[in-house]
């Protein structure tokens, strides 16, 4: 099959009050072609098979609609604005040889200039990656993006989800001389909100312990616990603790 171009169908959802950015790669190809399926929402992470919005729906009790309507889109935008969360997926377009949503199937990838966006939106403190450093994942691409400018991630916590931070020079894309001033931005590599990551979740010791305590506990519930810590907390509280996560679950806070 001749390679074809898979272009991201949505512009970044950015606004001046945003403090966190969700960063992924590309949605399924049908979102680019406009051939949505019943249950899809025509918005970022709107695939009926995706788990991000169902997870956020549970964390924040949003009562979201999961259908191809403008109301469903408006609900998501309203939530993001209220919680000061933006979306800026890192892949602008890529070539594919077969029709699927696999990150590994992407070739000749063109990345968005997220560092430029971060300079334009100075209130952003945290990047929430919807996946880790596996090949063609959001953290993997962001590392490549940083490398282009001689920047690196510094490891803060090696526990899942891994936490890093980096220093963004204030004059990276500016003619103004900021005399070496930098801005510290933290990154969180969340467990991917896709079924493909369920095997990795199932292998985690914490998941096994929680599953043993409650046989009905599942991989979606695990992500709800993990995501809630970083979507609900402000940056100064980002000291992720498996003990805290277990306590939240055991006392029914989540």
Image: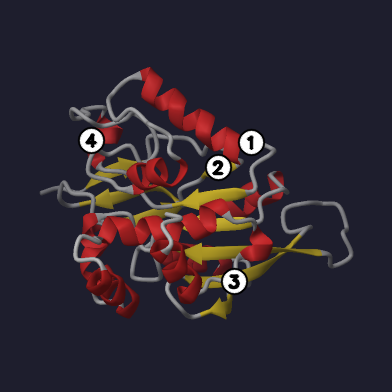
Judge whether 101 appears above or below 178 on screen: above
Judge whether 253 appears above or below 180 on screen: above
For the residue labelled by badge 4, is the local secondary structure a helix, a strand or a loop? Answer: helix
Apparent side of residue 217 relative to residue 91 in the rendered image (left or right): left
For the residue labelled by badge 3, is the local secondary structure a helix, a strand or a loop? Answer: loop
Q: Nearer the viewer, mark 3 or mark 1?
A: 3
N-term mark: 2 or 3: 2
N-term mark: 3 or 4: 4
Apparent side of residue 55 relative to residue 158 in the rendered image (left or right): left
Q: Do tag 1 and tag 2 residues touch (Cβ < 8 Å)?
A: yes
Residue 1 percent coordinates (x, y) = 10, 49
Q: Which residue is mark 2?
A: 86
Q: Which residue is mark 3?
A: 239
Q: Nearer the viewer, mark 2 or mark 3?
A: 3
Q: Which residue is mark 1?
A: 15
Q: In terms of image quadrants, where is residue 151?
A: bottom right
Residue at the top extreme, as displayed: 70
Q: Which mark, by number, is residue 228? A: none
Q: Which mark, by number, is residue 30? A: 4
């Amino acid at each position: 099959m001749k390679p074809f171009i898979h272009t991201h169908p949505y512009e970044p959802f950015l606004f001046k009050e945003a403090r966190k950015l969700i960063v992924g790669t590309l949605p399924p190809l049908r979102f680019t072609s406009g051939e949505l399926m019943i249950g899809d929402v025509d918005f970022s992470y709107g695939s009926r098979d995706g788990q991000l919005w169902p997870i956020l729906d549970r964390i924040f009790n949003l009562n979201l609609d999961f259908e191809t309507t403008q109301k469903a889109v408006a609900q998501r935008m309203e939530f993001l604005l209220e919680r000061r969360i933006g979306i800026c997926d890192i892949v602008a377009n890529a070539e594919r040889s077969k029709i699927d949503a696999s990150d590994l199937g992407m070739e000749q990838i063109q990345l968005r200039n997220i560092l430029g966006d971060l300079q334009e939106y100075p209130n952003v403190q945290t990047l929430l990656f919807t996946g880790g450093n596996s090949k063609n994942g959001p953290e993997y691409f962001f590392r490549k993006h940083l490398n282009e400018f001689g920047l690196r991630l510094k490891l803060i916590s090696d526990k899942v989800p891994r936490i890093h931070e980096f220093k963004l020079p204030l004059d990276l894309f500016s003619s103004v001389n900021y005399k070496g001033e930098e801005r510290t931005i933290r990154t969180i590599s969340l467990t991917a909100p896709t079924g493909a990551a369920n095997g990795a979740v199932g292998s985690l010791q914490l998941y096994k312990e929680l599953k043993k305590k409650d046989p009905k506990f599942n991989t979606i519930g695990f992500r709800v616990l993990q995501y809630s810590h970083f979507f609900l907390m402000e940056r100064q509280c980002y000291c992720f603790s498996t003990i805290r996560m277990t306590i939240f679950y055991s006392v029914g806070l989540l």
